[in-house]
Amino acid sequence: MARKRVTSGMRPTGSIHLGNLLGALDNWVRLQEEYDCFYFIVDWHALTTPGGGDAVGFENVGDLSANVHGMAIDWISAGLDPDKCSMFVQSHVPEVAELHLLFSMITPLGWLERNPTYKDMVQGYKIENPSLGLLGYPTLQSADILVYKGEFVPVGKDQEAHVNMTRDLAQRFNSLYGRDVFPITQALLTDVPKVPGRDGVDRKMSKSSGNYIATSLSADETTKKIRTMFTDPVKIRKDDPGHPDGCVVYAFHGIYNRAEQSVIRSECEKGERGCVDCKMQLSEKMNAALEPIRDRRVELEADPERVREILGAGADSARSIAMDTMREIREVMNIPTRENV
């Protein structure tokens, strides 16, 4: 039986951090073993918001190519295998733009204006004059998925609503033209670990907050980041009783040192464990986990042509499917071709 198809993308924002790795990439690596996976670096989406923060944006387009190349290195280093999945650059499949245009012809304006993510982005980036591209990004996102007839999009429970526009557009298109061209894409719910920032367990790791740890950092640089992590503010001395539930270091032990977490809690609460020692133990565990990623990164950085070959092969594979999809769509929509005019 043919494997079900998974599609997902990521904006090229510079080096990924632990939140990206643990929240998305680790899951993508697992999915490539069971699904027909298409993973794309969404460079067009990066142009919809101003530069800075978590976006490349139209103010920093000069960094876009370098960020795309760097993200490809991040992905492969994290374990994505070009023999098991297709990874490529969004804009290298121009059929996506054509489908985005056609979707814009059937998408009610109210759907876009009511999109809560659009409102959040306008407010978050303090955009005074939102572009048409930002308003219409959900149709581009839907085209990213449906041009490959994606059946599943891996998301956490809190992001399930992001798949709804794609579902709505697929249903609307199929209904308008009387043929089930597109699958009704489903959210592939995944357990996404809560990855806090270095500044507090209630703060999400993000570039805009500056509280992240990039996977491209060396072991020494990672250790320096860990040393500045927020700990228990009332635990001044080693023998003071600690409160691990409010400590970022303890939270990361739950990710990288789970086997010893119960012992760490007990020692902390009894005042038998100091924060410096706790950080150094975390540094050892985290660096050990990241070492294979760093080793693969060194190899790929020394062979940029290999990275371009992987992206090129992925784009060729994806575009073959996209071209078939667009031929079907043009036929269904009765769009004139050179042959039938």
Image: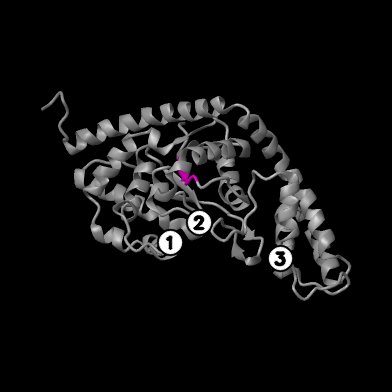
Q: Which residues are magenta?
A: 6-12
Q: Which residue corresponds to mark 2?
A: 53
The answer to whether any part of residue 181 appears in the image is no
Q: Residue at x 37, y 27 (%)?
A: 320
Dividing the image into 4 quarters, which one contains the C terminus? top left
Give, as a three-letter code, the residue at label 2: Gly
C-alpha gap between disc 2 and disc 3: 22 Å
Helix, strand or loop at label 2? It is loop
Q: Does the residue at mark 1 contact the one at mark 2 (Cβ under 8 Å)? A: yes
Q: Position of residue 84 (x, y in %)?
A: 54, 31
User: Three-letter amino acid code at disc 1?
Assistant: Tyr
The foreground one among 172 and 201 is 201
Of residues 110 and 11, which is closer to you in this image?
11
Query: Left or right of 149: which side holds 242?
Result: right
Label 1 packing within 10 angstroms: few (<14), some (14-19), many (20+) = some
**Which residue in the rendered view is the most extreme toward the top?**
339
Q: Tell me which corner region of the image, top left, top right, bottom left or bottom right, holds residue 77.
A: top right
Q: Is residue 61 magenta?
A: no
Give the labeled residue for mark 1: 125
Q: Earlier in the sequence, mark 1 or mark 2?
A: 2
Question: What kind of element bears circle 1?
Answer: loop
The spot of residue 67 in percent (x, y) is 51, 41
Where, by quadrant of the figure, is residue 305 drawn? top right
As measured in the structure, the alpha-carbon distance from the residue carrying label 1 to the one carrying label 3 is: 27 Å
Residue at x 43% of width, y 27% of height: 317
Magenta stretch secondary structure, dominant: strand
Reading the image, the residue beneath label 3 is 230
